[in-house]
Image: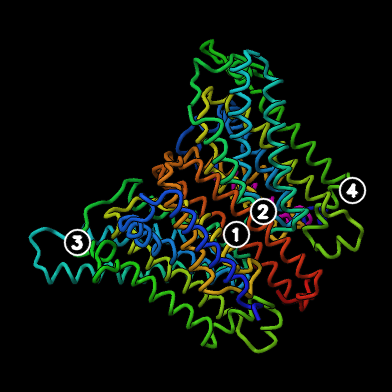
Amino acid sequence: MNKKIKRIFSHSEIYLFFIIIIFSIILTSINPSFLTLENLFDLIKSSAGMGILAVGFLIVLLSGGIDVSFTAIAIAGQYISANVLMATGVDNIYLAFLISCSVGILLGAINGLLISVFKLPTLIVTLGTLSAFHGALLAFVGTKAINTAELPDCFKVFGHNNIFVLTRADGTSYGLSVYALILLGVVIMSWLILKYTMLGRGIYAIGGNRDSAVRAGFNIVGIQFFIYCYVGFLAGIMGVMHISLLRYSNPMYIVGTELGVIAAVVLGGARITGGTGSIIGTLLGVVMISILEKNLVLMGLSSYWHQLFVGLIIIIGVSITSYQNKRRGIRSLTFR
Amino acid sequence: MLGKYSKTIVLFTIMVGIIIIMSIFIPDKFLTVINFQSISSQIPEFGLLALAMMIAMMTGGIDLSVVSITNLTGVIAAVILTKLVSPQMGEGLITLIIILAILVAIISSLVCGLLNGVLIAYVGVPPILATLGTMGLFLGIAIVITEGHGITGFPDKFLFIGNGTIWIIPVPLIIFIVCALIVALVLNKTSLGLSIQMLGSNPVASWFAGISNNSILVKTYMITGLLAGISSVIMISRVNSMRPGYGYAYLLTAILVIVLGGVNPSGGFGTVTGVVVGVIILQLLQSGFNILAFSPFFKKFIWGFMLLLVMVINFFVAKYQQSSGKLKIHT
């Protein structure tokens, strides 16, 4: 029993969990409506997209890489799928997902090709593709925003879909969005890949020690190619969810929110040097960032503080894990 | 014999080629004094950021926070210049405040660099993530100070730094040339420069050679911050305003110039000449794109695409050299 408790506390996720609890108690004491089921459902709906991007970024980080282009992929998937649907007149959400995810996988494959075959540094490649993808979208596809009236109905209907609906005392109703189901699906799929497939173990292995992974016989080129395609796929899903949530599309959106996603993953305890990190931690990180984002004003701070907090969270998060890593390195006489 | 300088010679040829092509196709707009003046007034602020990035990259790191440092220090200087100066002040007092603003900007850029350096060297955070975090933090502080608004209207004397000319040479260009020379001297002629190159090639070996890696890293990022600070003073003086978020396109183009200029992104090798020629090439292309009236989005696409293209070309060049036996050991 004692051992079990000790094991639970050895995970950094548990601390984050307690921080979120304490934070929620404080927020509830300021504003009692914070701790309601309705607010919880709302939080899930609005942060599900970020959660999906965060799962993708976690997988890249696990492999020891970094990807900053996922936001450009998400907006490309969203904007292209919406435009195709409008041009063809087909009003089908599944087709939207199909187009958006195909665009995502294609753009992800470009990242994957450059990183795995040409062995180029992941950050510089994805900075380049962020600019190239977003620039190409704006220059060749268009810059015009799609407003709610023009938007195909399937997006609006999809955004309103609930798994179940509850009724308030005054007769109005609220429900848990279908977004929760999509997020759950992505989480389970990613978890299964990471935990139970050779591919997933390969991702951890590359992140832990690339040379050892090569010698253990992992197909590094294939695994890296898969990772970036998968991130593109997830970004494609997020793109459609985002447009359905806002019922509006502007090709300038989403790009620029990378830091928030990265902060969530780092906060969730993923080691930036690769090899360790869990999906649960990442989701907790997303919850923390979302609560912070939504309630800054409630804490008496204007929204201008958001960027500062995101930066601070990244710095503190990476500092803690890096410092632990460094001390372990000194103890075992390995030098950076 | 080409060996060490081959990349620089290739770059120089490309530069001359671009000038010739543009002179042939758009001579009436390209070959004008105004065009060259606008090119030379844009080179400095961007060139200083590229030099800053180069030094960070030579140690095997990267500094993603350079543009945020220029934003933060620019905002601080702008606040001092607008809040302390009032029209009825004497000339001498205004000059004093301008000097104060520049000093504070420089000092705050050093502090930003120090924070980066300490995080990377003593806490052990990988440079990409440390500077990614400080990129958000510094910009965040700048946004909080200004509440997202722009600051405009600096004393006329201050504008001389960004817009003045000595004889026919723009003042910013002079500042840039001086800084580039100093950086070249530091890298090639001082023990700090040698240590930076050794650290970049092999940190463990340099540590065993008795070099204090940590203090070198801190100094490196402080120099990087300093260059970003100087760049910010030129920047706010040139446009006579400061708004957080200004100049974010420079991050990608700075990295593009570095890779174009033959700096090894994994550390150890880079020349000031290469980067300076890279900066000139980029600025020439930029002016060409402006003359051809390319949209900013198309330019964004081109820069990203060029960065990827240059890296892929470098990959094949390295592979060719390896197979022809010029460059062997590659870990």
Residue on which disc 2 sits: A66
Residue type at mark 1?
Answer: Leu
Residue type at mark 3?
Answer: Leu
Q: Which mark is residue B129?
A: 1
Residue on which disc 4 sits: A198
Q: Residue furthest top?
A: A171
* Badge 4: residue crowd in 10 Å (few <14, some 14–19, many ≥20): few
Q: CA distance from mark 1 to mark 2?
A: 9 Å
Q: CA distance from mark 4 to mark 3?
A: 64 Å
Determine whether the residue tagged by mark 1 lies in a helix, strand or loop.
Answer: helix
Determine whether the residue tagged by mark 4 lies in a helix, strand or loop.
Answer: helix
Residue type at mark 2?
Answer: Ile
- Are labels 3 and 2 on one chain? no
Judging from the image, mark 3 belongs to the subunit labelled: B
Mark 2 near mark 4, Cβ–Cβ under 8 Å?
Answer: no
Mark 4 near mark 3, Cβ–Cβ under 8 Å?
Answer: no
